[in-house]
């Protein structure tokens, strides 16, 4: 961070530009929209893939995360690894899909560093970061269609950036790219739950996470279920925090997904039970299966939760 800035948008723009340069290798397509906005199809009408998904996770984190895919052990060995030494800014200030960008029948939640420019979410009352000198921005949408002009205008008006300075990246949940970028939020969901638990965000100084990469599914509900279950029942996160050992212990005990009242069914079944009302689901379900929290000022480490292979078997097959 230089001069008090981490330059989320500058970092993300650099990665988005590299995606366009490597479009053929990544299996993506790019074009200009009706208002001059740049569009990157990363998995809707283009094949996309794991590498495209990794780059999108990096973009979502504003360039403040290191993201890779690796083979581990077990039945679901292909995993995404995510880490950041500025996890609050990377995950909550950028990666979290918190900006509702809906218009008529079009619905999408905006993710990425554009959120730090818009600052329309209550979450930014807790995040002091500002980037007033951003010259461009990148928005990631979990959808199969590019944004209509009304959405582009909304983003432009809110951020003060001309449409041609905006890059919209989109990929549906059912695509390999979409699956990859959603599971790449394993660290982010832990940060968001810590925030919901009123743990002081400025006490979280470093973090890393891992989750299995599920096979995509052509049905949206099943695809969404698999990506959520990969984190809820198979994700692991390590956090490094300041403060007392007791505070670290309390966080470790409360963070795992099994503390939720809705734990214990495939996510697709839970979604059906609540008749498709995402917000009726206990928000504490959205967290990794296993958590390790280290109190860096005392040297104590606390562990809680565990992977649930039976649930992964039901969901991932």
Image (tube, rainbow, N blue to C red):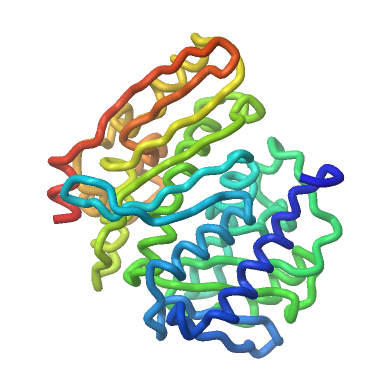
Foreground of the two, 249 or 109: 249
Quarter of the image with the N terminus is: top right
Q: Position of residue 173 (x, y in %)?
A: 37, 66
Asked if 291 appears above or below 212 in the picture, the reply is above
Residue 188 horizontal side relative to residue 216, left or right? right
Q: Position of residue 59 (x, y in %)?
A: 58, 61
Foreground of the two, 138 or 266: 138
Q: Is residue 51 visible?
A: yes
Asked if 14 appears above or below 80 in the picture, the reply is below
Quarter of the image with the C terminus is: bottom left
Q: Is residue 282 visible?
A: no
Please give the count of numbered marks on the rendered protein: 0
Residue 225 horizontal side relative to residue 245, left or right? left
Residue 65 horizontal side relative to residue 4, left or right? left
Q: Position of residue 40 (x, y in %)?
A: 55, 79
In the image, what residue occupies the spot 33% across and 34% down?
A: 257
In the image, what residue occupies the spot 13% across and 41% down?
A: 310
Q: Quadrant of residue 166?
A: bottom right
Q: Quadrant of residue 46?
A: bottom left
In the image, what residue occupies the spot 63% across and 88% down?
A: 32
Q: Position of residue 48 (x, y in %)?
A: 41, 76
In the image, what residue occupies the spot 64% across and 81% down?
A: 38
């Amino acid at each position: 961070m230089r001069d008090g800035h981490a330059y989320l948008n500058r970092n993300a723009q650099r990665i988005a530009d590299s995606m366009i340069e490597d479009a053929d290798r990544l299996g993506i397509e790019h074009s200009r929209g009706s208002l001059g906005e740049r569009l990157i199809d990363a998995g809707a009408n283009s094949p996309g893939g794991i590498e495209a998904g990794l780059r999108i996770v990096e973009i979502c984190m504003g360039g403040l995360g290191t993201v890779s895919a690796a083979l581990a052990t077990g039945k679901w060995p292909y995993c995404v690894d995510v880490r950041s030494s500025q996890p609050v800014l990377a995950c909550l200030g950028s990666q979290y899909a918190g900006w509702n960008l809906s218009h008529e029948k079009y619905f999408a939640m905006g993710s990425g560093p554009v959120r730090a420019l818009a600052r329309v979410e209550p979450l930014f009352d807790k995040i002091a970061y500002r980037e007033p000198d951003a010259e461009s921005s990148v928005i990631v949408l979990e959808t199969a269609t590019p944004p209509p002009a009304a959405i582009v205008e909304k983003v432009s008006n809110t951020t003060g950036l001309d449409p041609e300075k905006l890059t919209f990246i989109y990929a549906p949940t059912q695509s390999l790219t979409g699956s990859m970028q959603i599971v790449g939020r394993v660290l982010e969901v832990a940060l968001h739950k810590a925030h919901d638990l009123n743990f002081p965000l400025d006490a979280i100084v470093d973090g890393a996470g891992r989750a299995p990469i599920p096979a995509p599914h052509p049905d949206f509900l099943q695809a969404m279920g698999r990506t959520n279950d990969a984190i809820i029942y198979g994700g692991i996160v390590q956090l490094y925090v300041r403060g007392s050992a007791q505070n670290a212990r309390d966080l470790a005990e409360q963070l795992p997904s099994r503390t939720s009242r809705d734990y214990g069914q495939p996510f697709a079944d839970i979604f059906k039970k609540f008749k498709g009302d995402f917000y009726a689901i206990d928000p504490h379900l959205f967290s990794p299966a296993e958590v390790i929290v280290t109190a860096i000022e005392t040297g104590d480490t606390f562990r809680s939760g565990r992977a649930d292979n039976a649930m992964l078997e039901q969901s991932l097959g």
